[in-house]
Amino acid sequence: QKEVEQDPGPLSVPEGAIVSLNCTYSNSAFQYFMWYRQYSRKGPELLMYTYSSGNKEDGRFTAQVDKSSKYISLFIRDSQPSDSATYLCAMTDNYGQNFVFGPGTRLSVLP
Amino acid sequence: EAQVTQNPRYLITVTGKKLTVTCSQNMNHEYMSWYRQDPGLGLRQIYYSMNVEVTDKGDVPEGYKVSRKEKRNFPLILESPSPNQTSLYFCASGTSGVDTQYFGPGTRLTVL
């Protein structure tokens, strides 16, 4: 079993849809949870990070962490074609040195 | 412009020929890290460094070496590359690990 699981997609949605992206993990030591966006032929860029359980909102993006279920989510409201990318979840422990990434979900938002 | 640069961007080499991929950042970051990205496996951490002269292994360090002699540079060394090291490599830097990590543009390495 991989340490972090993520549905690879591809996920295709119409413009304006609400998108839900998810990851599950097995290591209970993880405390920091991040979502990165990666456009084709580019390096990942950080979208959001949260500490421990709870929700965090930033514009059209909402990150949720449920540590009891070892499950994290990223919601994108009013999705745009420019959101088409691969979304990677990542996590680390309190030391914040060693990071584990999910394999990524490829998202296409169709005009 | 704040950025992480990697060189070369593309490299095709043969088994056993030593190579170095350079990484440099101009943001005065203390934390730097190397990752490899493979289809279906995502990003896997190779090595990281919390500061000058301080490096540690990530999840897949076998076959790689690093050094951190200056704060801005963090080269990745493959002493004897093998075909299973064919991958897309990313360097990243940040003020601390859990803060924003800025990724470089990637180096696509093919080992024949």
Image: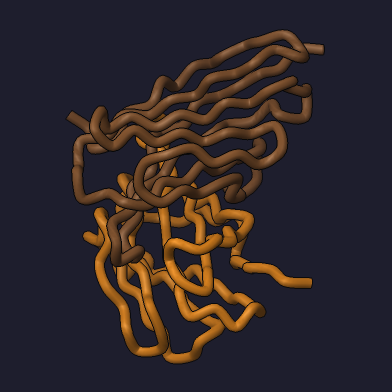
Quarter occupied by the C terminus of chain A: top right
Measured as percent of width and height from the top left, residue B71 is found at 51, 87
Instruction: Say if B14 sits above or below B78 in the image.
Output: above
Residue A15 showing in the rendered view: yes
Q: Residue at x 63, y 68 (%)?
A: B4
* x then y, percent, for residue B44: 35, 49
Q: Is residue B41 left or right of residue A85?
A: left
Front position in the image: A61 or B57? A61
Picture quadrant of residue B79: bottom left
Tell which of B23 and A12 is nearer to you: A12
| Horizontal side, residue A7 vs residue A21: left or right | left
Res B86 visible: no
Position of residue A4 measured from the top left corner of the image (x, y, whole percent): 30, 35
Q: Residue at x 69, y 68 (%)?
A: B3
Q: Which chain is brown?
A: A
**Residue, x 60% and y 22% (percent of image)?**
A107
Above or below, comparing residue B7 to residue A71 in the picture: below
From this viewpoint, which residue is outermost toward the right? Answer: A111
- Residue B45 position in % (x across, y down): 35, 55
Residue positioned 49% across, 17% down in the render:
A9
Chain B appears in which tint?
Answer: orange
Residue B77, above or below B71: above
